[in-house]
Image: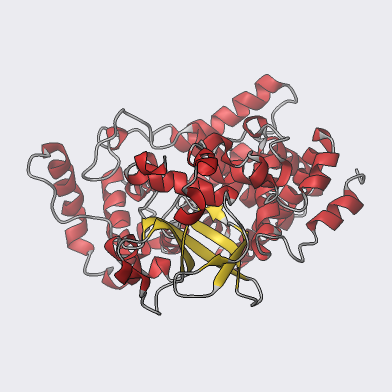
Amino acid sequence: MIQEYKGNNREARLSRVWQVLGFPERDIPLTRGGTVTPLHPGFLNRGKGPDFKNAVLQFNDDPPVTTDVEIDWTDREWRLHGHDSDSEFDSVGLRVVWDCKGTETFELNQAEPPLIRLRPFLEGPEWNWAMGLEPETTWTHPKAIRFAGKCRKVWNRMSVSEIRRALERIALVRLWNKGDGIRIRAQRLGWDQAFWESLISVLGFQKNYWPFRRLAELGSLWIQHDSDHSSVLARLSGLAGLLPNVTTKDDVESSRYLQEIWSYWWREQHYFQEFILPDSMWRRDQIRPLNFPERRLALAAFWACSGALTERVWYWANQVPGADQRSQKKWRRQLYDLLSGSARHDFWSHRANWRRRLNQPAGLMGQGLFNEIVVNAILPWIWAREYAEERAHRLIEIEQIYLNWPATPDNSRLRNLNWRLMGNKMQIRKMKAGAVQGLLGVSRFYCEKFNSLCEGCPMPDRLSREKYIH
Protein backbone atom coordinates (compact mmCIF):
# COMPACT_ATOMS: atom_id res chain seq x y z
CA MET A 1 0.00 0.00 0.00
CA ILE A 2 1.02 3.61 -0.44
CA GLN A 3 1.35 4.18 3.29
CA GLU A 4 4.45 1.97 3.44
CA TYR A 5 6.55 4.60 1.68
CA LYS A 6 8.34 6.94 4.06
CA GLY A 7 9.83 10.45 3.99
CA ASN A 8 11.14 11.93 0.76
CA ASN A 9 10.75 8.60 -1.01
CA ARG A 10 6.97 8.77 -0.85
CA GLU A 11 6.89 12.38 -2.06
CA ALA A 12 9.14 11.43 -4.98
CA ARG A 13 6.80 8.59 -5.87
CA LEU A 14 3.79 10.87 -5.57
CA SER A 15 5.56 13.20 -8.02
CA ARG A 16 5.82 10.32 -10.51
CA VAL A 17 2.09 9.75 -10.16
CA TRP A 18 1.54 13.40 -11.04
CA GLN A 19 3.95 13.12 -14.02
CA VAL A 20 1.79 10.50 -15.69
CA LEU A 21 -1.51 11.80 -14.22
CA GLY A 22 -2.29 8.36 -12.84
CA PHE A 23 -5.74 9.35 -11.56
CA PRO A 24 -9.01 10.77 -12.99
CA GLU A 25 -8.05 13.83 -15.00
CA ARG A 26 -11.25 15.86 -15.18
CA ASP A 27 -13.01 17.91 -12.53
CA ILE A 28 -10.84 16.95 -9.56
CA PRO A 29 -12.43 18.64 -6.51
CA LEU A 30 -10.48 21.34 -4.70
CA THR A 31 -10.59 21.29 -0.91
CA ARG A 32 -11.85 24.87 -0.82
CA GLY A 33 -14.52 24.27 -3.46
CA GLY A 34 -14.51 24.17 -7.22
CA THR A 35 -12.64 21.79 -9.52
CA VAL A 36 -9.41 21.60 -11.50
CA THR A 37 -8.59 19.72 -14.70
CA PRO A 38 -4.85 19.13 -15.32
CA LEU A 39 -4.18 19.48 -19.05
CA HIS A 40 -0.42 19.07 -18.68
CA PRO A 41 1.50 18.13 -15.50
CA GLY A 42 4.44 20.42 -16.28
CA PHE A 43 8.11 19.52 -16.10
CA LEU A 44 9.95 18.13 -13.11
CA ASN A 45 12.13 20.77 -11.46
CA ARG A 46 15.35 19.40 -9.98
CA GLY A 47 16.44 22.76 -8.60
CA LYS A 48 15.12 25.10 -5.98
CA GLY A 49 11.45 26.03 -6.08
CA PRO A 50 8.21 24.20 -6.99
CA ASP A 51 8.38 20.52 -7.94
CA PHE A 52 6.82 21.06 -11.39
CA LYS A 53 7.19 24.06 -13.69
CA ASN A 54 4.87 25.26 -16.46
CA ALA A 55 1.90 23.00 -15.79
CA VAL A 56 -1.30 23.82 -17.70
CA LEU A 57 -4.43 23.72 -15.51
CA GLN A 58 -8.09 24.57 -16.01
CA PHE A 59 -9.95 25.71 -12.90
CA ASN A 60 -13.71 25.18 -13.11
CA ASP A 61 -14.75 26.39 -16.58
CA ASP A 62 -12.19 29.20 -16.77
CA PRO A 63 -9.61 29.40 -19.58
CA PRO A 64 -6.51 27.24 -19.00
CA VAL A 65 -3.56 28.86 -17.19
CA THR A 66 0.15 28.05 -17.05
CA THR A 67 1.44 27.77 -13.51
CA ASP A 68 3.70 25.76 -11.18
CA VAL A 69 2.75 22.81 -8.95
CA GLU A 70 4.09 21.81 -5.54
CA ILE A 71 3.90 18.17 -4.39
CA ASP A 72 3.70 17.40 -0.66
CA TRP A 73 2.64 14.38 1.33
CA THR A 74 0.29 16.40 3.57
CA ASP A 75 -1.08 19.93 3.52
CA ARG A 76 0.85 20.91 6.67
CA GLU A 77 4.21 20.69 4.88
CA TRP A 78 3.49 23.85 2.91
CA ARG A 79 4.06 25.86 6.09
CA LEU A 80 6.44 23.45 7.82
CA HIS A 81 8.86 23.72 4.88
CA GLY A 82 8.50 27.51 4.80
CA HIS A 83 6.99 27.62 1.32
CA ASP A 84 4.36 30.13 2.45
CA SER A 85 7.06 32.76 3.10
CA ASP A 86 9.51 31.80 0.33
CA SER A 87 9.36 34.00 -2.79
CA GLU A 88 10.55 31.03 -4.87
CA PHE A 89 7.08 29.53 -4.41
CA ASP A 90 5.05 32.60 -5.35
CA SER A 91 4.48 31.04 -8.77
CA VAL A 92 2.71 27.95 -7.35
CA GLY A 93 -0.88 27.77 -8.60
CA LEU A 94 -1.77 24.33 -7.25
CA ARG A 95 -0.72 22.13 -4.35
CA VAL A 96 -1.02 18.36 -4.72
CA VAL A 97 -1.02 16.23 -1.54
CA TRP A 98 -1.74 12.65 -0.57
CA ASP A 99 -4.01 13.70 2.29
CA CYS A 100 -4.84 16.47 4.75
CA LYS A 101 -4.01 16.20 8.46
CA GLY A 102 -7.08 16.98 10.52
CA THR A 103 -10.38 18.60 9.62
CA GLU A 104 -9.17 22.07 10.57
CA THR A 105 -6.80 22.18 7.63
CA PHE A 106 -9.70 22.08 5.19
CA GLU A 107 -10.32 25.69 6.17
CA LEU A 108 -7.34 26.92 4.18
CA ASN A 109 -6.04 30.44 4.08
CA GLN A 110 -7.46 32.03 0.94
CA ALA A 111 -4.03 33.54 0.22
CA GLU A 112 -2.54 30.05 -0.15
CA PRO A 113 -2.68 28.15 -3.47
CA PRO A 114 -5.64 25.80 -3.98
CA LEU A 115 -5.21 22.18 -2.90
CA ILE A 116 -6.23 18.74 -4.19
CA ARG A 117 -6.06 15.39 -2.35
CA LEU A 118 -5.04 12.27 -4.26
CA ARG A 119 -5.96 9.75 -1.60
CA PRO A 120 -9.57 9.26 -2.80
CA PHE A 121 -8.22 8.32 -6.23
CA LEU A 122 -5.16 6.27 -5.28
CA GLU A 123 -6.21 4.28 -2.23
CA GLY A 124 -7.57 1.25 -4.06
CA PRO A 125 -5.37 -1.65 -5.20
CA GLU A 126 -5.94 -0.79 -8.84
CA TRP A 127 -3.76 2.30 -8.34
CA ASN A 128 -0.90 0.67 -6.47
CA TRP A 129 1.03 0.46 -9.73
CA ALA A 130 1.39 4.24 -9.69
CA MET A 131 3.52 4.32 -6.55
CA GLY A 132 5.74 1.60 -8.02
CA LEU A 133 6.83 3.73 -10.97
CA GLU A 134 10.59 4.05 -11.28
CA PRO A 135 12.33 7.29 -12.37
CA GLU A 136 13.84 5.87 -15.54
CA THR A 137 10.48 4.56 -16.79
CA THR A 138 8.15 7.39 -15.78
CA TRP A 139 8.35 9.38 -19.01
CA THR A 140 8.21 6.26 -21.20
CA HIS A 141 4.98 5.13 -19.60
CA PRO A 142 2.06 5.06 -22.11
CA LYS A 143 0.07 7.50 -19.96
CA ALA A 144 2.92 10.02 -20.14
CA ILE A 145 3.67 9.79 -23.88
CA ARG A 146 0.65 12.01 -24.66
CA PHE A 147 2.47 14.90 -22.97
CA ALA A 148 5.28 14.82 -25.53
CA GLY A 149 5.81 17.81 -27.79
CA LYS A 150 3.58 18.16 -30.84
CA CYS A 151 6.58 18.16 -33.13
CA ARG A 152 7.64 14.66 -32.03
CA LYS A 153 5.60 13.04 -34.79
CA VAL A 154 7.44 15.11 -37.40
CA TRP A 155 10.86 14.42 -35.86
CA ASN A 156 10.11 10.69 -35.79
CA ARG A 157 9.28 10.67 -39.53
CA MET A 158 12.76 12.01 -40.23
CA SER A 159 15.88 9.89 -40.50
CA VAL A 160 18.73 10.35 -38.03
CA SER A 161 20.79 12.19 -40.64
CA GLU A 162 17.87 14.54 -41.41
CA ILE A 163 17.41 15.24 -37.70
CA ARG A 164 21.10 15.98 -37.34
CA ARG A 165 21.06 18.41 -40.27
CA ALA A 166 18.00 20.20 -38.88
CA LEU A 167 19.58 20.52 -35.43
CA GLU A 168 22.84 21.78 -36.93
CA ARG A 169 21.00 24.54 -38.81
CA ILE A 170 19.45 25.67 -35.53
CA ALA A 171 22.84 25.40 -33.80
CA LEU A 172 24.37 27.74 -36.36
CA VAL A 173 21.71 30.33 -35.54
CA ARG A 174 22.83 30.15 -31.90
CA LEU A 175 26.44 30.61 -32.99
CA TRP A 176 25.58 33.62 -35.16
CA ASN A 177 23.53 35.23 -32.39
CA LYS A 178 26.33 34.82 -29.83
CA GLY A 179 28.92 36.00 -32.32
CA ASP A 180 26.92 39.13 -33.15
CA GLY A 181 26.60 39.98 -29.45
CA ILE A 182 30.36 39.58 -28.98
CA ARG A 183 31.11 41.66 -32.08
CA ILE A 184 28.92 44.51 -30.83
CA ARG A 185 30.70 44.49 -27.45
CA ALA A 186 34.08 44.44 -29.20
CA GLN A 187 33.18 47.51 -31.25
CA ARG A 188 32.62 49.43 -28.01
CA LEU A 189 35.21 47.93 -25.66
CA GLY A 190 37.74 46.07 -27.80
CA TRP A 191 38.31 42.41 -28.58
CA ASP A 192 40.19 41.72 -25.35
CA GLN A 193 37.32 42.83 -23.10
CA ALA A 194 34.77 41.03 -25.30
CA PHE A 195 36.85 37.87 -24.96
CA TRP A 196 36.90 38.03 -21.16
CA GLU A 197 33.19 38.79 -20.90
CA SER A 198 32.38 35.81 -23.09
CA LEU A 199 34.83 33.50 -21.29
CA ILE A 200 34.05 34.35 -17.65
CA SER A 201 30.27 34.37 -18.14
CA VAL A 202 30.33 30.69 -19.13
CA LEU A 203 31.75 29.78 -15.71
CA GLY A 204 28.46 30.72 -14.08
CA PHE A 205 26.39 28.32 -16.19
CA GLN A 206 22.68 29.17 -15.81
CA LYS A 207 22.39 29.72 -12.08
CA ASN A 208 25.27 32.18 -11.64
CA TYR A 209 25.55 33.65 -15.11
CA TRP A 210 24.83 37.23 -14.07
CA PRO A 211 27.31 37.56 -11.17
CA PHE A 212 30.07 36.08 -13.34
CA ARG A 213 29.04 38.41 -16.15
CA ARG A 214 29.32 41.36 -13.78
CA LEU A 215 32.78 40.25 -12.65
CA ALA A 216 33.82 40.02 -16.30
CA GLU A 217 32.63 43.60 -16.87
CA LEU A 218 34.86 44.61 -13.94
CA GLY A 219 37.80 42.81 -15.54
CA SER A 220 40.01 45.91 -15.57
CA LEU A 221 40.03 45.75 -11.74
CA TRP A 222 41.30 42.18 -11.38
CA ILE A 223 42.83 40.92 -14.64
CA GLN A 224 46.51 41.34 -13.82
CA HIS A 225 48.87 39.69 -16.30
CA ASP A 226 52.02 38.08 -14.91
CA SER A 227 50.85 38.53 -11.29
CA ASP A 228 50.80 35.70 -8.79
CA HIS A 229 47.63 33.65 -8.46
CA SER A 230 46.95 34.54 -4.81
CA SER A 231 46.86 38.29 -5.41
CA VAL A 232 44.51 37.97 -8.38
CA LEU A 233 42.26 35.52 -6.54
CA ALA A 234 42.15 37.83 -3.52
CA ARG A 235 40.84 40.74 -5.55
CA LEU A 236 38.48 38.57 -7.60
CA SER A 237 37.02 36.78 -4.54
CA GLY A 238 36.74 40.09 -2.70
CA LEU A 239 34.83 41.70 -5.56
CA ALA A 240 32.59 38.64 -5.74
CA GLY A 241 31.80 38.92 -2.03
CA LEU A 242 32.82 35.28 -1.54
CA LEU A 243 35.79 35.81 0.77
CA PRO A 244 34.91 34.61 4.30
CA ASN A 245 36.22 36.43 7.35
CA VAL A 246 37.03 33.30 9.35
CA THR A 247 37.25 29.55 8.91
CA THR A 248 36.84 26.72 11.35
CA LYS A 249 39.69 26.59 13.85
CA ASP A 250 40.42 22.92 13.23
CA ASP A 251 40.95 23.53 9.47
CA VAL A 252 44.57 24.68 9.60
CA GLU A 253 45.15 24.46 5.85
CA SER A 254 42.20 26.67 4.98
CA SER A 255 43.00 29.17 7.73
CA ARG A 256 46.59 29.64 6.53
CA TYR A 257 45.62 30.03 2.89
CA LEU A 258 42.79 32.41 3.75
CA GLN A 259 45.20 34.54 5.78
CA GLU A 260 47.44 34.76 2.73
CA ILE A 261 44.51 35.86 0.55
CA TRP A 262 43.38 38.42 3.12
CA SER A 263 46.91 39.84 3.31
CA TYR A 264 46.29 41.15 -0.21
CA TRP A 265 42.62 42.05 0.06
CA TRP A 266 42.57 43.98 3.36
CA ARG A 267 44.78 46.72 1.93
CA GLU A 268 42.55 47.49 -1.05
CA GLN A 269 39.01 46.44 -0.16
CA HIS A 270 38.17 50.02 0.83
CA TYR A 271 38.88 51.25 -2.71
CA PHE A 272 36.61 48.64 -4.33
CA GLN A 273 33.77 48.75 -1.81
CA GLU A 274 31.23 50.12 -4.31
CA PHE A 275 31.90 47.23 -6.74
CA ILE A 276 31.55 44.29 -4.30
CA LEU A 277 28.67 42.00 -5.28
CA PRO A 278 25.99 41.25 -2.68
CA ASP A 279 25.71 37.68 -1.44
CA SER A 280 22.09 37.53 -2.65
CA MET A 281 23.30 37.42 -6.27
CA TRP A 282 24.83 33.97 -5.84
CA ARG A 283 22.84 30.75 -6.23
CA ARG A 284 24.25 27.68 -4.50
CA ASP A 285 21.33 25.22 -4.59
CA GLN A 286 21.55 22.11 -6.75
CA ILE A 287 25.19 22.80 -7.75
CA ARG A 288 27.74 20.02 -7.65
CA PRO A 289 30.80 20.69 -5.47
CA LEU A 290 33.08 20.68 -8.53
CA ASN A 291 31.06 23.61 -9.92
CA PHE A 292 31.02 25.79 -6.79
CA PRO A 293 31.62 29.49 -7.57
CA GLU A 294 34.77 29.59 -5.42
CA ARG A 295 36.45 26.96 -7.62
CA ARG A 296 35.38 28.78 -10.77
CA LEU A 297 36.93 31.99 -9.41
CA ALA A 298 40.19 30.14 -8.76
CA LEU A 299 40.19 28.99 -12.41
CA ALA A 300 39.47 32.53 -13.64
CA ALA A 301 42.37 33.79 -11.52
CA PHE A 302 44.73 31.35 -13.28
CA TRP A 303 43.62 32.70 -16.65
CA ALA A 304 43.96 36.30 -15.52
CA CYS A 305 47.55 35.93 -14.36
CA SER A 306 48.72 33.63 -17.17
CA GLY A 307 49.61 36.52 -19.47
CA ALA A 308 48.23 37.49 -22.90
CA LEU A 309 45.60 34.75 -22.97
CA THR A 310 43.57 36.51 -25.66
CA GLU A 311 46.48 36.66 -28.09
CA ARG A 312 47.46 33.05 -27.45
CA VAL A 313 43.90 31.82 -28.11
CA TRP A 314 43.78 33.86 -31.33
CA TYR A 315 47.12 32.38 -32.39
CA TRP A 316 45.79 28.87 -31.67
CA ALA A 317 42.69 29.54 -33.76
CA ASN A 318 44.81 30.39 -36.78
CA GLN A 319 46.87 27.18 -36.60
CA VAL A 320 44.56 25.24 -38.91
CA PRO A 321 44.91 21.49 -38.28
CA GLY A 322 44.94 18.76 -40.89
CA ALA A 323 41.80 16.93 -41.93
CA ASP A 324 42.84 13.68 -40.25
CA GLN A 325 41.43 12.80 -36.86
CA ARG A 326 44.81 12.67 -35.16
CA SER A 327 45.67 16.25 -36.14
CA GLN A 328 42.26 17.47 -35.01
CA LYS A 329 42.67 15.79 -31.63
CA LYS A 330 46.16 17.21 -31.16
CA TRP A 331 44.90 20.69 -32.07
CA ARG A 332 42.08 20.49 -29.50
CA ARG A 333 44.55 19.24 -26.92
CA GLN A 334 46.70 22.32 -27.44
CA LEU A 335 43.80 24.55 -26.45
CA TYR A 336 43.02 22.36 -23.45
CA ASP A 337 46.62 22.67 -22.25
CA LEU A 338 46.49 26.42 -22.83
CA LEU A 339 43.41 26.81 -20.61
CA SER A 340 44.24 24.25 -17.94
CA GLY A 341 47.98 23.63 -18.04
CA SER A 342 48.76 25.65 -14.91
CA ALA A 343 45.35 25.34 -13.28
CA ARG A 344 46.56 22.98 -10.55
CA HIS A 345 46.73 24.14 -7.00
CA ASP A 346 47.69 22.51 -3.71
CA PHE A 347 44.55 23.91 -2.09
CA TRP A 348 41.88 23.93 -4.82
CA SER A 349 42.72 20.48 -6.17
CA HIS A 350 40.90 18.96 -3.19
CA ARG A 351 38.55 21.79 -2.13
CA ALA A 352 35.03 22.71 -3.21
CA ASN A 353 35.17 26.04 -1.36
CA TRP A 354 36.93 27.53 1.64
CA ARG A 355 35.31 25.12 4.09
CA ARG A 356 34.31 22.00 2.18
CA ARG A 357 36.65 19.29 0.95
CA LEU A 358 36.16 17.19 -2.17
CA ASN A 359 35.75 13.44 -1.85
CA GLN A 360 38.65 12.98 -4.26
CA PRO A 361 41.18 15.33 -5.90
CA ALA A 362 40.13 17.05 -9.12
CA GLY A 363 41.50 19.72 -11.42
CA LEU A 364 39.81 23.07 -11.78
CA MET A 365 38.76 22.31 -15.35
CA GLY A 366 37.64 18.92 -16.56
CA GLN A 367 36.83 17.85 -20.11
CA GLY A 368 33.14 18.66 -19.76
CA LEU A 369 33.73 22.24 -18.64
CA PHE A 370 36.37 22.64 -21.35
CA ASN A 371 33.89 21.67 -24.06
CA GLU A 372 31.28 24.07 -22.65
CA ILE A 373 33.81 26.92 -22.63
CA VAL A 374 34.94 26.29 -26.21
CA VAL A 375 31.44 25.94 -27.69
CA ASN A 376 29.79 28.77 -25.77
CA ALA A 377 32.62 31.31 -25.50
CA ILE A 378 35.81 30.74 -27.48
CA LEU A 379 34.45 29.62 -30.86
CA PRO A 380 31.75 32.36 -30.92
CA TRP A 381 34.46 34.94 -30.11
CA ILE A 382 36.71 33.61 -32.89
CA TRP A 383 33.77 33.58 -35.34
CA ALA A 384 32.88 37.19 -34.42
CA ARG A 385 36.46 38.34 -35.00
CA GLU A 386 36.72 36.56 -38.33
CA TYR A 387 33.39 38.10 -39.33
CA ALA A 388 34.64 41.58 -38.43
CA GLU A 389 37.75 41.01 -40.54
CA GLU A 390 35.54 39.79 -43.43
CA ARG A 391 37.30 36.46 -43.90
CA ALA A 392 34.41 34.43 -45.28
CA HIS A 393 36.38 31.23 -45.86
CA ARG A 394 37.40 31.20 -42.20
CA LEU A 395 33.78 31.58 -41.09
CA ILE A 396 32.89 28.33 -42.82
CA GLU A 397 35.84 26.57 -41.17
CA ILE A 398 34.89 27.84 -37.70
CA GLU A 399 31.27 26.79 -38.21
CA GLN A 400 32.31 23.25 -39.11
CA ILE A 401 34.61 23.10 -36.08
CA TYR A 402 31.72 24.31 -33.93
CA LEU A 403 29.30 21.68 -35.24
CA ASN A 404 31.78 18.80 -34.90
CA TRP A 405 33.30 19.73 -31.55
CA PRO A 406 32.97 16.94 -28.94
CA ALA A 407 30.14 17.41 -26.45
CA THR A 408 29.31 16.15 -22.97
CA PRO A 409 25.51 16.30 -23.12
CA ASP A 410 24.58 13.89 -20.33
CA ASN A 411 22.36 16.05 -18.13
CA SER A 412 18.72 15.92 -17.13
CA ARG A 413 17.67 18.96 -19.16
CA LEU A 414 18.93 17.49 -22.42
CA ARG A 415 17.55 14.03 -21.62
CA ASN A 416 14.09 15.52 -21.03
CA LEU A 417 14.31 17.54 -24.24
CA ASN A 418 15.43 14.51 -26.21
CA TRP A 419 12.51 12.48 -24.88
CA ARG A 420 9.91 15.22 -25.30
CA LEU A 421 10.87 16.11 -28.86
CA MET A 422 12.22 12.90 -30.37
CA GLY A 423 11.32 10.05 -28.05
CA ASN A 424 15.00 9.26 -27.53
CA LYS A 425 15.44 8.53 -31.23
CA MET A 426 18.80 10.29 -31.09
CA GLN A 427 21.45 8.71 -28.86
CA ILE A 428 22.26 11.70 -26.73
CA ARG A 429 25.65 10.45 -25.54
CA LYS A 430 26.87 10.22 -29.14
CA MET A 431 25.80 13.75 -30.09
CA LYS A 432 28.35 16.29 -31.26
CA ALA A 433 28.18 19.89 -30.12
CA GLY A 434 26.12 20.86 -33.18
CA ALA A 435 23.28 18.49 -32.33
CA VAL A 436 23.37 19.44 -28.64
CA GLN A 437 23.32 23.16 -29.38
CA GLY A 438 20.52 22.59 -31.87
CA LEU A 439 18.47 20.78 -29.26
CA LEU A 440 19.00 23.65 -26.83
CA GLY A 441 18.11 26.05 -29.61
CA VAL A 442 14.76 24.32 -30.19
CA SER A 443 14.02 24.78 -26.49
CA ARG A 444 15.11 28.43 -26.49
CA PHE A 445 13.50 29.53 -29.76
CA TYR A 446 10.29 27.50 -29.48
CA CYS A 447 9.56 25.47 -26.32
CA GLU A 448 10.26 28.32 -23.88
CA LYS A 449 8.04 30.73 -25.84
CA PHE A 450 4.91 28.57 -25.80
CA ASN A 451 3.08 26.65 -23.12
CA SER A 452 3.55 22.97 -22.33
CA LEU A 453 0.70 22.03 -24.69
CA CYS A 454 2.64 23.61 -27.58
CA GLU A 455 -0.33 25.85 -28.41
CA GLY A 456 0.57 28.16 -31.29
CA CYS A 457 4.08 26.73 -31.73
CA PRO A 458 5.11 26.88 -35.42
CA MET A 459 7.86 24.27 -35.06
CA PRO A 460 5.86 21.25 -36.38
CA ASP A 461 4.79 23.11 -39.53
CA ARG A 462 8.28 24.46 -40.18
CA LEU A 463 9.80 21.00 -39.80
CA SER A 464 7.23 19.55 -42.20
CA ARG A 465 8.05 22.19 -44.81
CA GLU A 466 11.83 22.19 -44.43
CA LYS A 467 12.89 18.66 -43.52
CA TYR A 468 13.73 17.74 -47.09
CA ILE A 469 15.76 20.91 -47.74
CA HIS A 470 19.42 19.93 -47.67
Residue 423 placement (x, y as % from top left) = 70, 40
Can residue 60 be seen here? The reply is yes
- Of the pair 233 and 109, the residue shown nearer to us: 109
For the point 31% across and 28% down, which residue is it?
360
Taking 321 as reference, is 84 above or below it? below
Residue 52 placement (x, y as % from top left) = 51, 57
Can residue 302 be seen here? The reply is no
Q: Quadrant of residue 348?
A: top left
Q: Quadrant of residue 372?
A: top right
For the point 66% across and 26% down, which residue is it?
328
Q: Quadrant of residue 346?
A: top left
Taking 163 as reference, is 70 above or below it? below
| Quarter of the picture holding the C terminus | top right
Residue 61 placement (x, y as % from top left) = 65, 76
In the rendered view, does 360 fall on the left or right side of 93? left
Residue 452 placement (x, y as % from top left) = 65, 60
In the rendered view, does 10 fall on the left or right side of 38? left
In the rendered view, does 287 fall on the left or right side of 179? left
Q: Residue furthest front?
A: 124
Taking 353 as reference, is 324 above or below it? above
Q: Residue furthest left?
A: 249
